[in-house]
Image (cartoon, grey):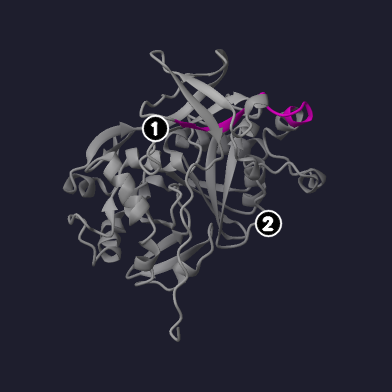
């Protein structure tokens, strides 16, 4: 298994290590529930170095990314991040990605760990087929990536940078920290405020010590604590964020996944002739009335949870499939996301989730299940 540059950090904090997409990663440290609550109430630090980081650079970088991504790239500004899908010719989802634009012809694309090799081959195949002047450089193993998320994180960040807390969501800055450059973005996958950063692999342990120099993560009331893959999954589910292999996949129509904002099929795109791979198939689906199933959120009563793959029923009739489910630590009841027939997606619709042992009653609710409260306005000095 591959090991991230923070492997010893995980062992030092007693991480329970598991294999994930070919990497040895921490599932949890003290427990998924505790780590989830820590992120929701204060702050957590995640090692996300297993995520792929692919540099796309050169004269035709924008043209390549316009073909690969379901969202416009050319109109991005320097210092902007943009969430997008990479589709196949059938309109299914190869992966969801985050594109960082540094300047006109210089980008980094962050991809899911399980899809890195597949996407590298796809990127290169499209580049070669269209004879584009682009350099594609996989920087995953030469860099590291961390995420620091939670309602108290930005106050901590403000102690060493005034610029980062002033960034808008989905913007990034390049900061110099001693002898290293760090790319810090106002992004995340938990539903909380915070930052994600990537930097040279050999420098990440030093950087983490500098950033968290006043934080003792061994204390029960620590401002920041390590969090693993388990809490990352329950946090993203509460925030209604799709995950590849669950809500996203090669055989799942991109228009079903609840991320229509990341799919640009407007007249402007069509008239410019810049069509992304899969757009023809998605336009056909849209013209025929839309996808047969759509992603919904389901709230359940009681304490019993469903699992991915459980059938969704309406009046005893199969109408869909659970894609993700858990007991919500924040809300105190089970939640699930599911693909259900498009004519049954109205809020309040009663459904049952068939676990094989029981049929759990639930109803469709709006996504996300949880929204972080806005920070209270700080009192003025003259108040």
Instruction: Note whether 80 is above or below 304 in the view shown.
Output: below
Q: Point out which mark residue 75 bears.
A: 2
First to last magenta residue range: 285-300
Q: Residue at x 67, y 48 (%)?
A: 63
Rendering coords of residue 139 (x, y %): 42, 48
Label 1 belongs to which residue?
326
Mark yes or no: residue 300 visible. Answer: yes
- In the rendered view of the protein, which quadrant contains the N terminus? top left
Location of residue 271 with respect to 159 vertically, above or below: above
* Residue 64 visible in the snapshot: no
Residue 131 lies in what quarter of the image?
Answer: top right
Residue 287 or residue 344, whichever sits in front:
344
- Eye-nearest disc, 2 or 1: 1
User: Residue 219 versus residue 71: which sits nearer the camera?
Assistant: 219
Quarter in which the C terminus is drawn? bottom left
Question: Element type at marker 1?
Answer: strand
Tell me the crowding category of disc 1: few under 14, some 14 to 19, or many 20 or more residues within 10 angstroms, Cα based: many
Query: Percent from the top left, x then y, of residue 207?
Result: 30, 62
Asked whether disc 2 touches disc 1, contact meaning CB atoms under 8 Å apart, the reply is no
- The residue sitting at 30% across, 57% down in the picture is 204
Q: Is residue 61 left or right of residue 374?
A: right
Mark-to-mark CA distance, 2 and 1: 38 Å
x and y, in percent, of residue 242 in the image: 51, 37
Q: Is residue 12 above or below residue 199?
A: above
Q: Residue farthest to the bottom?
A: 382
Q: Residue at left 58%, top 31%?
A: 295
Which badge, 2 or 1, comes first in the chain's sequence?
Answer: 2
Label 2's element? Answer: loop
Q: How many residues crowd around disc 2 within 10 Å: few (fewer than 14), some, or many (20 or more)?
A: few
| Figure label count | 2
Residue 114 percent across, percent down from the top left: 43, 33
Identify the residue at image location x=23%, y=43%: 29
């Amino acid at each position: 298994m591959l090991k991230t540059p923070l492997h010893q950090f995980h062992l030092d904090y007693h991480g329970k290590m598991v294999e994930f997409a070919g990497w040895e990663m921490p599932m949890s440290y003290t427990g998924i529930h505790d780590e989830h609550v820590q992120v929701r109430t204060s702050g957590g630090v995640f090692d996300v170095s297993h995520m792929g980081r692919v540099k796309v650079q050169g004269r035709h970088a924008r043209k390549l990314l316009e073909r690969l991504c379901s969202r416009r790239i050319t109109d991005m500004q320097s210092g902007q991040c943009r969430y997008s899908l990479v589709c196949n010719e059938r309109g299914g989802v190869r992966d969801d990605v985050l594109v960082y634009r540094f300047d006109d012809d210089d980008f980094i694309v962050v991809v899911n760990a399980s899809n890195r090799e597949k996407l590298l081959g796809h990127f290169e195949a499209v580049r070669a087929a269209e004879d584009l002047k682009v350099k594609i450089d996989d920087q995953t193993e030469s860099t590291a990536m961390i995420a620091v998320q939670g309602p108290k994180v930005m106050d901590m960040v403000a102690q060493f940078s005034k610029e980062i807390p002033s960034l808008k969501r989905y913007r990034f800055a390049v900061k110099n920290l001693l002898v290293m450059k760090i790319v810090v973005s106002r992004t995340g996958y938990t539903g909380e405020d915070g930052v994600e950063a990537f930097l040279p692999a050999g420098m990440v342990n030093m950087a983490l010590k500098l950033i968290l120099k006043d934080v003792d993560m061994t204390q029960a009331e620590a401002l920041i604590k390590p969090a693993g893959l388990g809490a990352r999954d329950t946090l993203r589910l509460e925030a209604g964020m799709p995950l590849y292999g669950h809500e996203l996949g090669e055989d799942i129509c991109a228009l079903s996944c609840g991320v229509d904002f990341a799919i640009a099929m407007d007249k402007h795109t069509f008239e410019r002739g810049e069509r992304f791979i899969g757009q023809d198939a998605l336009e056909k689906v849209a013209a025929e009335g839309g996808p047969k199933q759509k992603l919904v959120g389901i709230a359940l009563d009681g304490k019993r949870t469903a699992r991915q793959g459980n059938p969704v029923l309406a009046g005893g009739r199969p109408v869909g499939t659970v894609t993700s489910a858990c007991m919500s630590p924040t809300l105190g009841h089970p939640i699930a996301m599911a693909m259900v027939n498009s004519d049954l997606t109205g809020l309040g619709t009663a459904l049952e989730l068939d676990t094989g042992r029981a049929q759990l009653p639930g109803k469709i609710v709006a996504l996300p299940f949880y929204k972080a409260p806005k920070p209270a306005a700080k009192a003025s000095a003259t108040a």
